[in-house]
Image (cartoon, grey):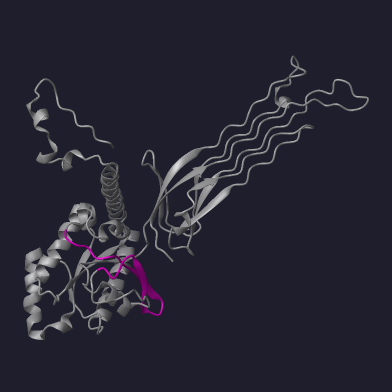
Amino acid sequence: MKFVDEVSIRVKAGDGGNGCMSFRREKFIENGGPNGGDGGDGGSIYMIADENLNTLVDYRYTRHFDAERGSNGGSTDCTGKKGEDLELRVPVGTTVIDAGTQEVIGDLTKAGQRLLVVQGGWHGLGNTRFKSSTNRAPRQTTPGKPGEQRDLKLELKVLADVGLLGLPNAGKSTFIRSVSAAKPKVADYPFTTLVPNLGVVSVDRWKSFVIADIPGLIEGASDGAGLGIRFLKHLARTRLLLHLVDMAPLDESSPADAAEVIVNELTKFSPSLAERDRWLVLNKCDQILEEEHEARVKEIVDRLGWTGPVYVISAISKDGTERLSRDIMRYLEDRADRLAADPAYADELAELDQRIEDEARAQLQALDDQRALRRSGVKSVHDIGDDDWDEEDVDDEDGPEIIYVRD
């Protein structure tokens, strides 16, 4: 199944039914009076979080969704039928955004959660509603109100406790295979991981956590290079980040340089995400001599100015992975206990989570705007170079120079 984590759709709630104008006409009954009924309300559209879905591919090709219109009112005070509500099922972790205003309508983070996205139109009134002691034969009715219409952007962020960061071929997929039952693709070339993968790590019989593997980052990812920058948003809801570093790169490059690239790209994407608790995991220790371990670790730690936890593992041979998994489980339990006991700490983390969400969305929106400008052939002010200016324009000092930029 194709993994789709961003789609744009248009939703239209049903219009309300019109009110009816009718008068009672029966044998032997004169001047029966008004008996026109009200119309029915239009159907609304709801988003439902479904734990059985893991992608937005259902909305990739079907982009328009209309709820049922309410029926018109009838004679003999018959009310029109209400339009059926439309329920759109999405994966847990989907954020619903108004495409026009960029307002976050809701965040579906729990299975079964229900979110109203557009309200159905209100029903029209029949002429029965307007009768009075002075108006015995009203001929007034009201039409049904139109249903709401919106352009929506759906963003899926996978829900995981732990997220993996690293360059391509750092061993992220091998690590998730070694500690869980997940089987992501593993090969000896970069970018074998094209979509996020989730794995459940069972530490004890009743203890487990979810780990997420995203495509590797490369230098310049924060400016749109490579694949990983768009998938960094999936780490926004994690509780802990594991920064995997290859201790023995095949191209004999410096592991310290590789670690620094990831830190820089993470900070450019979201400074707040860089504040998330992060552990340094040095992988492929089996590829170098044991006596060289300490020197490699010291080089990386000194380059990053690292003060957090450091683990040396070999994912393929599972050397050190069990200890790391148990430490992660202990960290998550301690974190949950502190959240329950310390409201100030909970508020601090909630504020950090909100900043991460805002920065990630702003960064991705900026990349989308740049892509739209390139497709339309219009350059951004920041992309204009010296070669884009005409000599005639430079010499013309009769008035101000105006650059039109399409938003």
Q: Position of residue 320 (x, y in %)?
A: 23, 81
Locate the N terminus by quadrant: bottom left
In the image: residue 18, left or right of residue 174: right
| Residue sitting at x 19%, y 62% | 218
Q: Position of residue 215 (x, y in %)?
A: 28, 65
Question: Foreground residue, 336 or 131?
Answer: 131
Q: Position of residue 254 (x, y in %)?
A: 9, 71
| Residue sitting at x 29%, y 73% | 173
Depicted 81 relative to depicted 332: above or below: above
Question: Foreground residue, 339 or 185?
Answer: 185
In the image: residue 20, left or right of residue 340: right
Quadrant assignment, res 83:
top right
In the image: residue 35, left or right of residue 89: right
Question: Foreground residue, 324 or 393?
Answer: 393
Depicted 262 relative to depicted 21: above or below: below
Q: Is residue 310 magenta?
A: no
Where does the magenta region start and end? 191-219
Q: Is residue 19 visible?
A: yes
Q: Position of residue 9 (x, y in %)?
A: 45, 47
Q: Is residue 275 visible?
A: no
Name the outermost residue toward the top.
134
Depicted 257 relative to depicted 41: above or below: below
Locate the C terminus by quadrant: top left
Q: Is residue 209 magenta?
A: yes
Quadrant assignment, res 387:
top left
